[in-house]
Structure formats: C-alpha cells, structure tokens
Image (cartoon, helix red, strand yellow):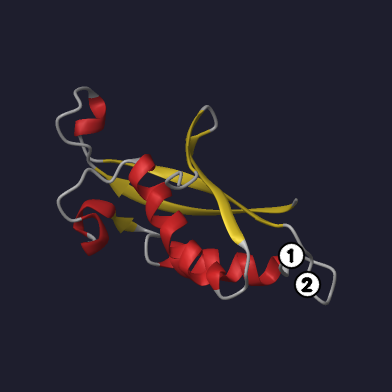
Amino acid sequence: MFKVTITKSFSAAHVLKEIGGKCEELHGHNFRVEVTVSSKKLNDENIIIDFRVLKGWTAEILEDLDHKYLNDLPQFKGVNPSSEIVAKHIFDRLSRKAKSSKIKVDEVTVWESDNARVAYSGAKT
C-alpha cells in the first residue's frame, strides 16, 4: 500500500455550545490539517497522486472555512463545529474528489493547537 500525506492550514473561529468551559465563548484557532491518501497501485507516472493536485483539492475545501465563523456556515448548521466535525467535513469532500482518481482518503487530522488534534478515517464497512 502506498500513502501520501500533505499538510495545509486555515484560521477560523467557532463557539462550542453545551460542553462547558471557555470553549462556549467565541474563540479561534490556527488549524493545521493533514490529509493522507492511499492506493495499492501507482498511476502511469509511478505516483499515487501529484502532491499539487492533493494540495489543490484541500486548499479549495479549506478556502470555504478560512477566516470564517464556522457556526454560521451552512455545512455546520445545527451542529457544534468541533474539530471532529470539521475533520469529517474535509474527509467527506476530499473522498468525493478522490473517487475519480481511484485513490482512497485514509485519514484527515485536524490540529487545533500544537498539542491537541483529532482524526477522522471514515465509517468502517
């Protein structure tokens, strides 16, 4: 199995309701996002995917989140826009893009800080 990982970042604010503590107040993060994709086979160029393509897909998704108040975005309507939910959102959107390239999105990790991260790897079938 071959794997490729890229890292991108974005900044955003959110409020996490009903969890207690300071996170119930408006606050923001400089989020770091790691995306790992895999394939059993290499393409005709002997790569899984061009890093630029994967970075481009990820940047397109993160552009919708960057410098935004996540609670106001339609994709997070009715849910706490936690890092877990953000990771799932990115994973799902990337998975749709990757399907045509016959690669699998293995995992999306979202870092809120240097010492706090979450990861989402999709529903197990």
Residue type, label 1: Ile
Tell me which corner region of the image, top left, top right, bottom left or bottom right, holds residue 50: bottom right
Q: Is residue 68 left or right of residue 112?
A: left
Question: Is the residue 101 above or below the residue 21 in the image?
Answer: below
Determine the residue located farthest toward the top in the rendered image: 21
Determine the residue located farthest toward the front in the rendered image: 125
Q: Residue at x 26, y 31 (%)?
A: 23
Which residue is denoted by mark 2 in the rendering?
43
Relative depth, front residue between 108 and 11: 108
Residue type, label 2: Asn
- CA neighbours of label 2 inside 10 A, class few (<14), some (14 to 19), many (20+): few
Q: Residue at x 77, y 63 (%)?
A: 41
Q: Is residue 46 left or right of residue 14?
A: right
Relative depth, front residue between 8 and 121: 121
Residue 67 in the image, given as x and y percentages of width and height: 37, 58
Q: Residue at x 75, y 50 (%)?
A: 1
Tell me which corner region of the image, top left, top right, bottom left or bottom right, holds residue 25: top left
Do the residues bearing badges 2 and 1 touch, measured as CB atoms within 8 Å? yes
Relative depth, front residue between 14 and 110: 110
Determine the residue located farthest toward the right in the rendered image: 46
Residue 33 in the image, given as x and y percentages of width and height: 53, 49
Which residue is denoted by mark 1 in the rendering?
48
